[in-house]
Amino acid sequence: MTTTNSLPARSLIVAQALADAGVEGEVVELPDSARTAAEAAAALGCQVGQIANSLVFWADATPLLVMTSGRHRVDTTALARRLGRTTLERATPEQVRLATGQAIGGVAPVGHPTPLETVVDESLAEYARVWAAGGTPHTVFPTTFDELVRLTGGSVHPVTS
């Protein structure tokens, strides 16, 4: 694993946002891709559920970041209903990059051009440590559920039916 001083530019932005927020966990670069929850869990030696996937949706024409446990698929109909939205659709790769400045598979919960409304999957609270992307498909950082909620200003919801 590579440490903060030699990270890609996108990950340096995330690392600075984490430092500014008082987060102790550092962004690290993995030798192999962590684009999927399964890849990240294998590289980190943790459970798939500990991976906090960053998924971008378009909710009533605005971006919405959903931090979900790697063991879940987001039920867009149920989540839209919980949030009082009429539509909730997966963002295109172009929309993800526009909203976050980052590519799919590496979207961090912070370091975006402007803060995003965020939902944090309540099931991430089951783990003492979770891992989130650090701005690229090869970078991650450790955090906790409470810290993730604080860091993102996210609202906590179930993301499944």
Image (cartoon, grey):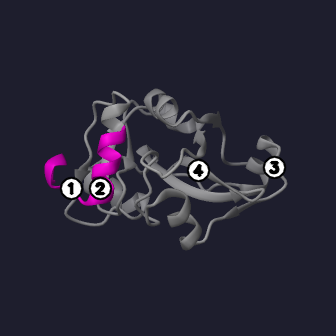
Q: Amino acid at mark 3?
A: Arg
Q: Amino acid at mark 2?
A: Thr
Mark closest to the chain's N terminus, 3 or 4: 4
Residue at image mark 2: 139
Instruction: State the residue at coordinates (34%, 32%).
Output: 20
Q: Is residue 43 left or right of residue 116?
A: left
Q: Is residue 61 left or right of residue 144?
A: right
Mark 3–mark 1 distance (CA, rounded to whole Å): 37 Å
Mark closest to the chain's N terminus, 4 or 2: 4
Tell me, yes or no, if residue 70 can be seen here.
no
Q: Is residue 125 left or right of residue 73?
A: left
Q: Secondary structure at mark 2?
A: strand
Q: Secondary structure at mark 3?
A: loop
Residue at image mark 1: 7
Mark 4–mark 1 distance (CA, rounded to whole Å): 24 Å
Residue at image mark 3: 85
Structural crowding at the residue carrying mark 4, measured as other residues with C-alpha within 10 Å and reported as few (<14), some (14–19) or many (≥20) = many
Mark 4–mark 2 distance (CA, rounded to whole Å): 18 Å
**Residue 128, quarter of picture:** top left
Looking at the image, the residue that sits furthest to the front is 113
Q: Position of residue 1 (x, y in %)?
A: 16, 54
Indicate whether 133 appears above or below 138: above
Q: Which residues are magenta?
A: 1-17
Q: Nearer the viewer, residue 84 or 121?
A: 84
- Residue 9: say if magenta: yes
Q: Amino acid at mark 4?
A: Leu
Dominant secondary structure of the residues highlighted in magenta in the image? helix
Mark 3–mark 4 distance (CA, rounded to whole Å): 14 Å
- Residue 117: say if magenta: no
Instruction: State the residue at coordinates (15%, 55%).
Output: 6
Q: Which mark is residue 65?
A: 4
Q: Position of residue 55 (x, y in %)?
A: 55, 56
